Image: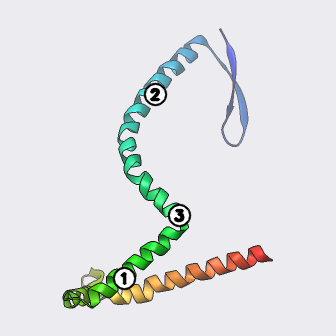
Amino acid sequence: MVRWVLSWTGVSLRAKQESDSDIAAAAGMNENRQADAELARLPRELVDRLTKPFIQFLRIEAAAGAVLLSFAVAAVVLSNSSWAHAFFDVWETRVGLHIGSLEFARSLRDWINGGLMTLFFFLVALELKESWSWAN
């Protein structure tokens, strides 16, 4: 038996002729691929079960505000508690890159104030630009 198969390669559409031996070989490869796919899917189910609630939580727009508010409350509580000294010591922890005599390190407070706040305001500017472009 001979059949014609159209295959799409993304750029061109080709037709090729397949014989019975080609069809049998393809069927054997498909069975192997299905078995491999089943084995590869087993750990993924565990990962999906663990990450699906987290992803659903992140899709809720109010979730970001709730997380930010909870961390702000935790920071205020920690800074006014008996653990305030340890909390402030964490802020002064040096984080950076050390290669030989070359040192690129700053305190955690500097990284957050300089880097993450810059990223935050950049994202705010992008959101404003998007909302203004949709308005026009």
Q: Quadrant of the C terminus?
A: bottom right
Q: What residue would you read off at disc 1?
A: 73
SS at badge 2:
helix
At a point 50% along the width and 24% down the height, the residue shown is 30
**Residue 114 picture quarter:** bottom left
At a point 47% along the width and 57% down the height, the residue shown is 55
Task: Answer whether labels 1 and 2 touch (C-beta < 8 Å).
Answer: no
Measure how far apart labels 3 and 1 are at the Cα level. Answer: 21 Å
Mark 3 is on which residue type?
Ile
Mark 2 is on which residue type?
Gln
At a point 20% along the width and 86% down the height, the residue shown is 83
- Image coords of residue 49 (percent x, y): 39, 47
Q: What residue would you read off at disc 3?
A: 60
Q: Nearer the viewer, residue 109 or 52?
A: 52
Q: Nearer the viewer, residue 42 or 64?
A: 64
Give the answer, above or below, for where 37 lies relative to 76: above
Give the answer, above or below, for where 37 lies relative to 107: above
- Image coords of residue 101 (percent x, y): 25, 87
SS at badge 1:
helix
- Image coords of residue 59 (percent x, y): 53, 61
Mark 1 is on which residue type?
Val
**Residue 66: in sight, yes or no?**
yes
Report the disc number at residue 10: none
Report the disc number at residue 34: 2
